[in-house]
Image: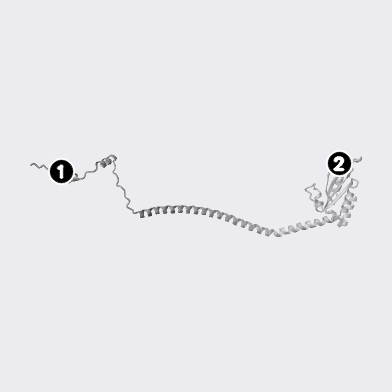
């Protein structure tokens, strides 16, 4: 009997190769075809209790994040509100200080204001009393004397007080003379328009009268070229002061006679 033994077959690697179990040909072919090693299946060894705790922690973390973002938004809005409120408070404080300064100025000027009011009231009282003292008969007589030979008076009215001063219209804005009364008249002026001018000149030359005004001139129904006029003239304070000073009145009368 011939026994033939190959020493190469006695190596450990060869022996292991002979006794190694054969792998599934289908899986080997799939692995060789894909070129990748198939991963082992994953097995979740965590108990369900701990898995639920992990999920709850995720939910809690998301909730805390939302709360933090909301807190930041609220803090930002509060900061803006505080800034606006501070500016409003500053403006209010400035307004209070300005009001306090104005109040102090008004209080400082109060004596002057009271004095001005008292002076105005006293002036009104004096003017009112002076208007009540207007000598109606003397004024009308003076008017007729001044216009004699120049105007045939057909109607004359004298009004004093508030109504009297308001009835006369001012024709000279630069000569604002206080009036005690107003004379309104109608008549026929001789000599045409020259006669009308003579009437106005005579009234303007007397200190008792001022601002004579003739707004209406029409032809009279006469044959001597007379013009029918209507006008008005203001009565000054001289009408009262002259009568209270007989000596001054005598001087005026002498000048008129000349």
Q: Give the quadrant of residue 110.
A: bottom right
- Mark 2 or 1, which is nearer the eye? 1
User: Does residue 218 appear anywhere in the picture?
Assistant: yes
Residue 258 spot, x, y in % from top left: 90, 50
State which tag comes first along the sequence, 2 or 1.
1
Quarter of the image containing the N terminus? top left
Task: Decide which of 17, 46 is in the foreground and name it.
Answer: 46
Q: How is the image coloured?
A: one colour
Task: Classify 10 Å Cα crowding around label 1: few (below 14), some (14-19), many (20 and above).
Answer: few
Residue 121 spot, x, y in % from top left: 76, 57
SS at circle 1: helix
Residue at screen point 63% across, 57% down:
99
Residue at screen point 55% across, 55% down:
85
Task: Decide which of 15, 134 is in the foreground and name it.
Answer: 15
Task: Decide which of 234, 47 is in the foreground and name it.
Answer: 47
Farthest residue to the left: give it. 1
> Which residue is the site of mark 2?
218
Residue at screen point 50% across, 53% down:
74
The reply, left or right, for residue 220 in relation to residue 17 is: right
Cα separation, mark 2 vs mark 1, equals 166 Å
SS at circle 2: strand
> Which residue is the site of mark 1?
9
Q: Give the quadrant of residue 247.
A: bottom right
Disc 2 to disc 1: CB gap under 8 Å: no
Farthest residue to the right: give it. 223
Residue 203 spot, x, y in % from top left: 86, 48
The reply, left or right, for residue 128 in relation to residue 223 is: left
User: Does residue 207 appear anywhere in the picture?
Assistant: no
Residue 236 spot, x, y in % from top left: 83, 52
């Amino acid at each position: 009997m011939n026994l033939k033994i190959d020493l190469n077959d006695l190596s450990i690697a060869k022996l292991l190769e002979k006794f190694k179990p054969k792998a599934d040909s289908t899986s080997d072919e799939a692995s060789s075809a894909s070129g990748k090693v198939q991963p082992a299946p994953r097995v979740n060894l965590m108990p369900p209790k701990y898995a639920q705790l992990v999920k709850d922690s995720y939910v809690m973390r998301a909730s805390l994040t939302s709360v933090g973002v909301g807190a930041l938004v609220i803090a930002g809005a509060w900061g803006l509100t505080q800034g606006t409120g501070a500016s409003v408070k500053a403006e209010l404080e400035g307004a209070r200080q300005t009001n306090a300064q104005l109040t102090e100025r008004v209080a400082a000027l109060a004596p002057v204001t009271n004095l001005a009011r008292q002076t105005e009231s006293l002036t009104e009282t004096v003017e009112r009393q002076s208007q009540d003292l207007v000598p109606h008969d003397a004024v009308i007589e003076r008017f007729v004397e001044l216009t004699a030979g120049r105007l045939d008076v057909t109607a004359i009215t004298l009004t004093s007080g508030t109504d009297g001063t308001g009835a006369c219209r001012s024709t000279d804005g630069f000569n604002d003379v206080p009036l005690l009364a107003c004379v309104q008249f109608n008549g026929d002026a001789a000599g045409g328009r020259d006669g009308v001018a003579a009437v106005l000149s005579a009234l303007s030359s007397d200190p008792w009268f001022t601002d004579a005004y003739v707004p209406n001139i029409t032809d009279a129904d006469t044959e001597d070229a007379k013009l029918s006029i209507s006008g008005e003239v203001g009565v000054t304070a001289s009408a009262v002061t002259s009568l209270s000073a007989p000596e001054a009145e005598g001087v005026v009368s002498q000048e008129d006679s000349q």
